[in-house]
């Protein structure tokens, strides 16, 4: 954003996008992707993980996800 060669219009678009993004929603999407990748790698699939739960369930478990040893 501080680079002089980047047009102000592009910087404005990036600022708008940054304000629009929700870090918790992004975390949920990352966890969904991780769960999907794990299910693809696993022969039996996975019945757990953010990809199998609603966003509200994910949010309710979020405080517990930060415990030491969380994978």
Image: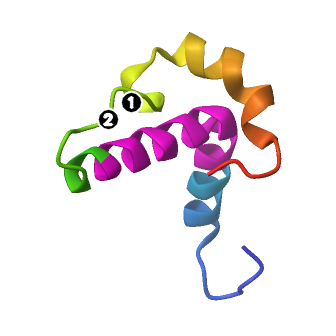
Q: Tell me where residue 18 appears, x and y as whole percent.
A: 65, 48
Q: Is mark 1 on a helix, strand or loop?
A: helix
Q: Say few, some or many: other residues with alpha carbon within 10 Å of mark 2 (under 14 / 14 to 19 / 20 or more).
A: some
**Residue 7, above or below 66:** below
Q: Say few, some or many: other residues with alpha carbon within 10 Å of mark 1 (under 14 / 14 to 19 / 20 or more).
A: many
Q: Is mark 2 on a helix, strand or loop?
A: loop
- Residue at image point 68% right, 21% down: 61
Q: Work out which residue is located at the far front of the displayed protein and give it.
A: 44
Displayed quadrant of residue 53 = top left
Quadrant containing the N terminus is bottom right
Q: In this view, does 31 lie to the left or right of 18?
A: left
Give the residue pinned by disc 1: 51
Q: Tell me where residue 47 appears, x and y as whole percent.
A: 34, 26
For residue 27: magenta? yes
Displayed quadrant of residue 32 = top left
Q: 49 or 17, which is in the foreground?
A: 49
Q: Mark 1 and mark 2: span between their CA atoms?
A: 9 Å
- Residue at image point 63% right, 64% down: 11
Colour scheme of the rendered structure:
rainbow
Range drawn in magenta = 16-38
Q: Tell me where residue 35 appears, x and y as whole percent.
A: 39, 42
- Residue at image point 67% right, 52% down: 15
Q: In this view, does 61 lie to the left or right of 58?
A: right
Give the residue pinned by disc 2: 46
Displayed quadrant of residue 67 = top right
Q: Do the residues labelled 1 and 2 touch (CB within 8 Å)?
A: yes
- Residue at image point 24% right, 56% down: 41
Q: Main secondary structure of the magenta part?
A: helix
Q: Is residue 53 left or right of residue 65?
A: left
């Amino acid at each position: 954003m501080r680079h002089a060669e980047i047009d102000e219009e592009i910087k404005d678009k990036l600022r708008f996008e940054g304000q629009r993004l929700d870090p918790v929603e992004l975390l949920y999407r990352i966890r969904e992707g991780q769960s999907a990748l794990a299910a693809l790698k696993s022969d039996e699939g996975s019945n757990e993980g953010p990809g199998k739960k609603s966003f509200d369930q994910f949010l309710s478990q979020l405080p517990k996800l930060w415990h030491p040893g969380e994978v």
